[in-house]
Amino acid sequence: MRKTLAAAAFAGALVVTAGTAGPVAAVGEGPGYGGNETVNTSILHTYDELVAELKTQDARQERLDLEVIGQSVKGRDLYLAKYISNPDNPTILYLTQQHGNEQLTTEGALEFIKHLGTGKNQGVLDGVNILVVPMLNPDGAMGDVDFPLEDYIASGGRHLTRYNANEVDLNRDHVAKVEPETRALHDNVMRKYGIDYMIDLHHQGAQSERDGQLVSGSILHPTTPNVDPSVLEGSKKLGAVVFDAIDPTGWGHLGKYVGGSAETISRNGIAVEYGISTLLFEMRGMSDHYREDYVLGQKSNGYLIKQTVTTLEATARAIADGSIADADTSFWDTLAEQNTRSE
Ligand SMILES: [Zn+2]
């Protein structure tokens, strides 16, 4: 039913706006979604395709170890891809898709893993241990959940949702750790490896702007008062490396995320519980949602996947060569909080 309506709206929009619609205003902003563009999930990796690709890379890459850290509510294996060259090296964890409908971060993480298998990245692996947990919420990503998704917007054979199969937001479960996905992360990753840094990768709504221009994403360090000052400083340096790698590009424009101090959120809770310097990175627009101002058409996929890959490669390199120690954190004092564009 929705597909029929969307198709009708699409045809109508072409008639009404032909000849009057200008090009998208700014480089890198990408098209939004106004009901007149396809949001199609079929081009994203399914869970099974993701696992197959991880196994292919594991077979190809000598330095990659693939580990199952637990199972989702619906019994899907949860994977950790790890590159541990030297236990004495600093270690960074990249976490994607706690929220199942935020998948371009996983697509980018998969690209990053492929790149780590190429010759030019071997030097990086000598200086940093890298852990990647891609798609922590595969049930939500596959729409295999115990609640209805019929009002979700995307077409393409499956819907993707924020919540796990029990309709729980995993990124509010980092204190209680009730859900199997959160428990697997804490028991078999957070407590098992001496992790120094973590970037938690998400997607936000599509209509956030900074200085009047739609953002490609937003970042934030821990904001709980309980975080150790040196841990917070590490988070700010991690953010500086990301900002310097993304914001000057033609397609990158970052705002400061507006977030609370609750320790149920990984950015806060993991920083306090383990003394890990965490950074939240929110990419623009979601792969699926029931809200039209949250989803983004796939014409933006290219630069958003690139934004993830660039972020992961820049931070891994800065930790490996030690240059993160010199990162200039002063931009945090002037970086404006993003606001939501009003129609
Ligand atoms: Zn999220």
Image (cartoon, helix red, strand yellow):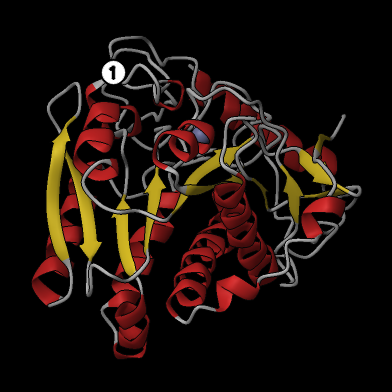
Q: Nearer the viewer, residue 212 or 258?
A: 258
Where residue 30 appears, as percent x and y from the top left, is: 70, 55
Q: Nearer the viewer, residue 314 or 23?
A: 314
**Residue shown at 31%/33% (left/top)?**
137
**Residue shown at 51%/20% (left/top)?**
2
Where residue 65 appears, as percent x and y from the top left, is: 14, 63
Asked if ligand 1 lies within 8 A of label 1, the reply is no
Q: Quadrant of the C terminus?
A: top right
Q: Which residue is denoted by mark 1 in the rendering?
A: 165
Residue 299, visible in the rendered structure: no
- The residue carrying pointer 1 sits among few (fewer than 14), some (14 to 19) or many (20 or more) residues within 10 Å by Cα, namely many
Where 49 falls versus 160 (above or below)?
below
Where 62 falls versus 30 (above or below)?
below
**Residue shown at 31%/38% (left/top)?**
136
Q: Is residue 51 left or right of residue 226?
A: left
- Snapshot quadrant of residue 132: bottom left
> Please, what is the three-letter code of the amino acid marked with disc 1?
Ala
Count all numbered tags in the image, as a single digit: 1
Where residue 50 appears, as percent x and y from the top left, is: 24, 52
Q: Is residue 167 left or right of residue 283?
A: left
Residue 270, visible in the rendered structure: yes
Where 280 falls versus 149 (above or below)?
below
**Residue shown at 22%/61% (left/top)?**
82
Where 25 falls versus 187 (above or below)?
below
Q: Is residue 67 left or right of residue 159?
A: left
